[in-house]
Image (spheres, helix red, strand yellow):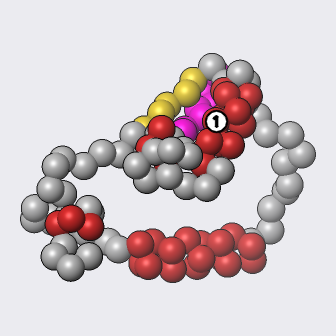
Amino acid sequence: MDRPFAIDRRTVLAGATLLTAVGAALPSKAQEKPVIDAATVLIVVDVQNDFCPGGKLAVQKGDEVVPVINALGQRFQNIVMTQDWHPVGHSSFASAHPGK
């Protein structure tokens, strides 16, 4: 698939590190308690059964994030959940790369 714009994870991580360093250098007021109002959204990214113990892409203790998300969700009026997926044969699967 041709993408007009693609960026790899190393570039994203390098940018995030730079932003963190710049942000640390700027004066700021610490917020003791986060403001959670009708305009605040909890965004839950890519929490799936496949990442839990016993799943196809299991992460050790991956299921421990679920109770935390559920508890946080009680405080928000707005929750957006995303789920990444790939069609069969996608290049992200090891099976798409001979010898891997």
Residue occupying the far front of the picture: 54
Residue occupying the far right of the picture: 32
Q: Nearer the viewer, residue 62 or 55?
A: 55
The answer to whether residue 30 is above or below residue 99 is above
Quarter in which the N terminus is drawn: bottom left
Quarter of the image for residue 92 reads bottom left
Lateral position of residue 34 relative to residue 66, left or right: right
Lateral position of residue 31 relative to residue 54, left or right: right
Examine the structure image and report whether residue 39 is included in the region drawn in magenta. yes
User: Can I make out residue 31 in this image?
Assistant: yes
Q: Nearer the viewer, residue 99 or 9?
A: 99
Lateral position of residue 19 relative to residue 37, left or right: left
- Residue 10 drawn at (x, y percent): 44, 79
User: Can I make out residue 45 in this image?
Assistant: no
Q: Which residue is mark 1?
A: 66
Residue shown at 59% from the left, 77% from the top: 17
- Residue 73 drawn at (x, y percent): 66, 27
Lateral position of residue 3 relative to residue 29, left or right: left
How many neighbours does mark 1 have within 10 angstroms: few (below 14), some (14-19), or many (20 or more)? few
The answer to whether residue 16 is above or below residue 36 is below
Q: Nearer the viewer, residue 31 or 12?
A: 12
Amino acid type shown at disc 1 = Val
Where disc 1 sits, the SS reads helix
Quarter in which the C terminus is drawn: bottom left
Residue shown at 65% from the left, 72% from the top: 20
Q: How many marks?
A: 1
Residue shown at 48% from the left, 38% from the top: 49
Residue occupying the far left of the picture: 2
- Residue 83 drawn at (x, y percent): 39, 40
Residue stretch in magenta: 38-44
The answer to whether residue 12 is above or below residue 64 is below
